[in-house]
């Protein structure tokens, strides 16, 4: 029983260590979409990896690993083109994209 508990604690410590290492190396990106009523979400894509967040009153933010990412602003209306923006994240960087203006 004690050996099983010890093994479980070691596994939990290893998982926490792996995730904390990943968080320490990630960066964050924030921005504001204008007009805020057009965008539903922002998707970051890099190879097979992707992160999706919902735009809240036009504001969005997400944690990304270092590298080249493509941000796709998904619009609520299907007959309009989505907006794409390429960014390069550095380790520990906080990137503020400011206001991203959408054309109607």
Image (tube, helix red, strand yellow):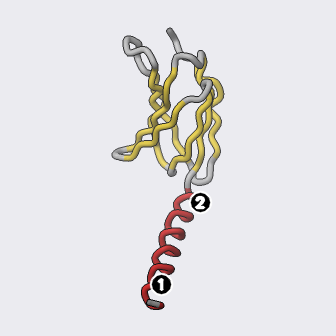
Q: In this view, does 86 lie above or below 12?
A: above
Give the camera-side residue of 80 and 40. Answer: 40
Which residue is the site of mark 1? 5
Tell me which corner region of the image, top left, top right, bottom left or bottom right, holds residue 81.
top left
Q: In this view, does 44 lie above or below 57?
A: below
Q: How crowded is mark 2: few (under 14 residues within 10 Å), some or many (20 or more)?
A: few
Image x and y of residue 14, in percent = 49, 74
Give the residue at x 47% y 90%: 2
Give the residue at x 64% y 44%: 94
Give the residue at x 46% y 20%: 75
Per the image, label 1 sits on a secondary structure element best described as helix
Q: How far apart are marks 1 and 2 (CA)?
A: 28 Å
Image x and y of residue 24, in percent = 59, 60
Image x and y of residue 56, in percent = 59, 29
**Which of the two discs, 1 and 2, labels the residue nearer the N terminus?**
1
Q: Is residue 20 above or below residue 85?
A: below
Q: Residues within 10 Å of mark 1 (few under 14, many from 20)?
A: few
> Are discs 1 and 2 less than 8 Å apart at CB?
no
Which residue is the site of mark 2? 24
- Does residue 13 appear to the left or right of 59 in the view shown? left
- Does residue 28 appear to the left or right of 15 in the view shown? right
- Does residue 46 appear to the left or right of 63 in the view shown? left
């Amino acid at each position: 029983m004690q050996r099983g508990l010890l093994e479980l604690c070691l596994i939990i410590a290893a998982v926490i260590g792996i995730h904390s290492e990943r968080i320490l190396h990630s960066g964050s990106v924030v921005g504001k979409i204008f007009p805020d009523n057009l965008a539903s979400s922002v998707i970051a894509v890099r190879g097979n990896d992707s992160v999706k967040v919902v735009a809240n009153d036009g504001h969005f933010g997400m944690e990304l690993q270092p590298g080249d990412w493509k941000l796709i602003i998904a619009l609520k209306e299907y007959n309009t083109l989505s907006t794409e923006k390429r960014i390069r994240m550095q380790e520990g960087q906080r990137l503020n994209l400011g206001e991203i203006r959408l054309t109607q």
